[in-house]
Each structure stands twice: as structure tokens, then as C-alpha cells.
Image (cartoon, rainbow, N blue to C red):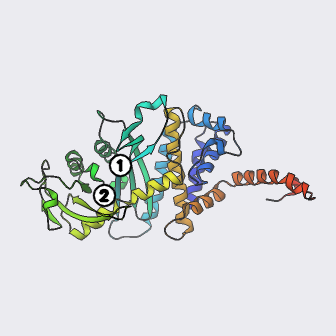
Amino acid sequence: MLAHAQELVYTLKELMPTQYQKDNLEVMLGLFLEAQGHPLPEHSQTKSPSALSRFLNINPWSTRDMIRTVRNHILQTVLKNLSQCGTGRRPFLQVIIDLTTLEKRGKFQDFKDLIRVYNSKRGLHLVVVYLVVGKWRIPWSFRVWKGKGTPSPAQLGLKLVKRLPKCLTQKFQVMILADTAFGSVEFLHGVRKLKYHAVTGIPINRKLVDGRILRHLHKQGQQVRLVGLKFPVTVSWYYLKRDNGKLEKRFVLSTRPIKASTLKWWGKRRWQIEGWFKTAKHRFGLHRFGQGTLLGMYRWLILSLTTYLIAHWTYLEIQFPSPPDWGQAAQTALESIFPRIVVSLLLLEIERLIPFTLSCGFDINISRCKI
């Protein structure tokens, strides 16, 4: 898998029109792979902040080509590796959909219409599709929710599901997993029309056609008819422990008949994306963009997601203990794929140490240093 990550980086560099931009891309990926959660241009030791800012906001390289290249590489890698697993039952393609907020303060003139307040959080609200198949974890696509009067998160999520590549949806059994915000009638009908199955959260006060509401149910795993839906669904519930230690009752539904225990298991699988959100933000700086243009912001998000994939593939290669140590995986990727950056940082560190070593009476000749 490390070889696949190296091949991806080399392919992305070839998309850059000049050597100067290739170097800038390498430096930016190196900053993200430090996995400290703040890969800001001013933290670079080898390129000026203004050069990296121009790379993100102004320089003419194709962001669309980068997205296509990363996706094609993902599909080739996943399908090739899973095809070597032999025959047997087709694994599930878990399509997890959720909304996350990249909280921001201040004014962003070029994309101020995208900064909204949702659930008391101000920032950029992303509807994300996160794929889980076998051992692979793939942030596949996202859309920005633009506020009231625009397509809802559920409508955006349905559009993203419709655009999943057929080479994946035809190869695997598709299971859509989503939060309560995506349990709308329109979303469930859309998933049903696509001939997929879905497990979503559902509000505790959702009405049944017989006049009852969900919290009046006492038997798990029974099929019920909800107001507005043209087909019956299976309903169950589980208790989720919150940060304050209290248990919260969560209802989940399935668009196909399954056992209560199976439904609860699938309902809890949706929470995988929450762990990924924390990793993407606090390790790979997804929410730390400070660019003044829409293009710069968009490129920042793409580079952050790409860097996560590089670290994830490195983790699969090295077989670190579970749960993953993303700092260690990212550091291994940095040392293996970007040795020039590591050497440059080491030389800078040596230069900073020279005044101290000379004051202590040591004589150092950098030209004789072997790295």
C-alpha cells in the first residue's frame, strides 16, 4: 500500500505545470503529513508563506484533474486488492453520510454566502460521503450546505449517493448509513428508487399511520408504516452514552426487513464517520483553512483529504496496532515519500545548532555530513 501512496504523490506532482508548483505541492503535502492539526503555510521551513498562498489561491493548476486522479487511484487500488481475496460473499460497501461543521470566525468576503449558522455553530457546513469497504476508509465526496432556501443536507446527500461510481455499487452490496437529519421521506424514497438499502436515524416523535409515535413502541424489530412513506420500515432502538454520562435513546430504521440485533449493529456503524471527522480536523487540519478565496479554500480541503488517504494507506502497509496512531502513520509516510523534505528540515536544524556548537568549541563541516 505504501507503493500505491508513493505512486499517487508522483502522479499528482506531474499534474503541476511547472517545477516550482511541483515543489510547492510537495511542501504542502509535507505540512499536512506532520499531522499536528495546523498545516499552515507560515509553518513551512522551506517555502515562504506568500509562495504557498499563491499556490493555493492563484497559481493555474487544475483542481478537478487532481480530484479525478485521486479517485481513479482509489478505485484501481481498492478493486485490485479486493479482487485478489478470492470468491465468496460480496462484502458490503458502507456509504456513510453525515454533516460536519468547519467552525470559522471573522469575515470571508469571497465566500461569505457559504458561512452559515447551523445548530448554533458558525462556519462551513459540509455534507460528506465516507466509504467503508473491507479495511479501506475513503472520504469520497462532499458538498457545502448553503443555508435556508437551498437544497437541504438530505437532498445534497441523495445527490452524492446518485453519483457513486458504478464500478463500486455493482461490485459490492450497498448499505446507506446516515444520521437522523437524513431520514426524510424524500431521502428514503430516493434510496429505495436506486434499489439500495438504508439504515438511518429517526426522530423519537416520528408519527405512524395509526396515529401513534415512535416512543410508544415496546417491541424492537417490528415493521411499521410511517406517515409519508409508501413502504413499511423496520424500527429498533439502542442507548447511546453521551459525554455527560447520561444514556440517550436513539431510534433507527431500515428500509428492508432485518432482525432487531442486526439493525442496531448497523445503526451503530454510522458513528465511524464521527471518528474520522475528529482525525481529519485535529490531525490533518481540515478546518484550519485561512485562504481568502473560494478556490484556495476548496484546494485546502482536497489536499487535506488526500493527505489522510496517504497516511491511511501507510497505516495499512505498516500494520500499526489498532486503533491507528495517525501521528506515527503520517510520520512514516513523510519519511518514506518525501525524503527531500526531511533532509531539508534536518539541514535547517543543523544550521540552527551551529552557533551553539561553535560556542562549545566544536568544529563542524556541513559539506562532510552524510545523510
Residue under the image location 48 percent in, 29 percent down? 110
Q: Nearer the viewer, residue 131 or 8?
A: 131
**Relative to 23, 300 lies left or right:** left
- Where residue 61 sits in the image (x, y, percent)? 56, 35
Viewer can see residue 39: yes
What residue type is disc 1 on? Answer: Leu
Secondary element at tag 2: strand
Quadrant showing the C terminus: bottom right
User: Mark 2 and 1 residues: CB-CB less than 8 Å, in contact?
Assistant: yes
Disc 2 target residue: 174
Mark 2 or mark 1: whose residue is earlier in sequence? 1
Of all residues, the one furthest to the left in this rendering is 210
Q: Nearer the viewer, residue 245 or 298?
A: 245
Viewer can see residue 364: no
Figure label count? 2
Residue under the image location 29 percent in, 32 percent down? 149
Q: Which quadrant would residue 266 be assigned to in this image?
A: bottom left
Q: Which quadrant would residue 251 be assigned to in this image?
A: bottom left
Density class for disc 2 (Cα within 10 Å; few <14, some 14-19, many ≥20) is: some
- Where residue 93 sits in the image (x, y, percent)? 35, 59
What residue type is disc 2 on? Answer: Val
Secondary element at tag 1: loop
- Where residue 213 sits in the image (x, y, percent)? 13, 55
Instruction: Return the mark for residue 277.
Output: none
Q: Nearer the viewer, residue 25 or 9?
A: 25
Instruction: Return the mark for residue 164.
Output: 1
Quadrant showing the N terminus: bottom right
